[in-house]
Image (tube, rainbow, N blue to C red):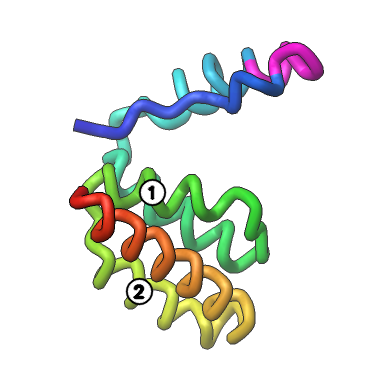
Amino acid sequence: MAAKQSAPQHLAPLAPKLVELTDNVLFGDVWERPELSPRDRSLITVTALAALYRTEQIGYHLRTALANGLTREELAEALTHLAFYAGWPNAMSAVTQLQAIVAEAESSGS
């Protein structure tokens, strides 16, 4: 089963339309289209965020990718491959976040 996603609700008082569009269009429509699995969408999203150096969003999407069935080994391999196409710092930053997320999950018994 795919991870349920939603916009950060604490942003709703400031940007209610952005939260609504995120929940209803991005996560309610785009992520639910049957042509790609949630796992595949997660892999695409993580690699795009890493390639574009969108470090603020990548932690959330790495967690979602793990919940959507990608393994830490698959994510690490995708990011290693990406280093040669999108830059070493981008991949290293993403792998560093992945390492922290995996360590956090292991320490909490998840």
Q: Would you call the spot at circle 1 few (<14 residues within 10 Å), some (14-19), or many (20 or more)?
A: many
Q: Is residue 76 left or right of residue 12?
A: left
1 and 2 marks in contact (CB < 8 Å): no
Residue 36, horizontal then vertical, whole percent: 31, 40
All told, the count of numbered labels is 2
Q: Is residue 20 magenta?
A: no
Q: Which residues are magenta?
A: 12-19
Q: Is residue 13 magenta?
A: yes
Q: Amino acid at mark 1?
A: Arg
The quadrant in which residue 67 appears is top left
Residue 49, horizontal then vertical, whole percent: 58, 57
Q: Would you call the spot at circle 2 few (<14 residues within 10 Å), some (14-19), or many (20 or more)?
A: some
> Going 47% across and 28% down the picture, which residue do you hit?
30
Residue 91 or residue 29, whichever sits in front: 91
Q: Is residue 14 left or right of residue 4?
A: right
Q: Is residue 82 above or below residue 108?
A: below
Task: In the rendered structure, find residue 63 and report the number of the disc placed on it.
Answer: 1
Q: Is residue 80 above or below residue 6?
A: below
Q: Is residue 19 above or below residue 71?
A: above
Q: Amino acid at mark 2?
A: Ala
Q: Which residue is mark 2?
A: 76
Viewport quadrant of the N terminus: top left
Residue lying furthest right: 14
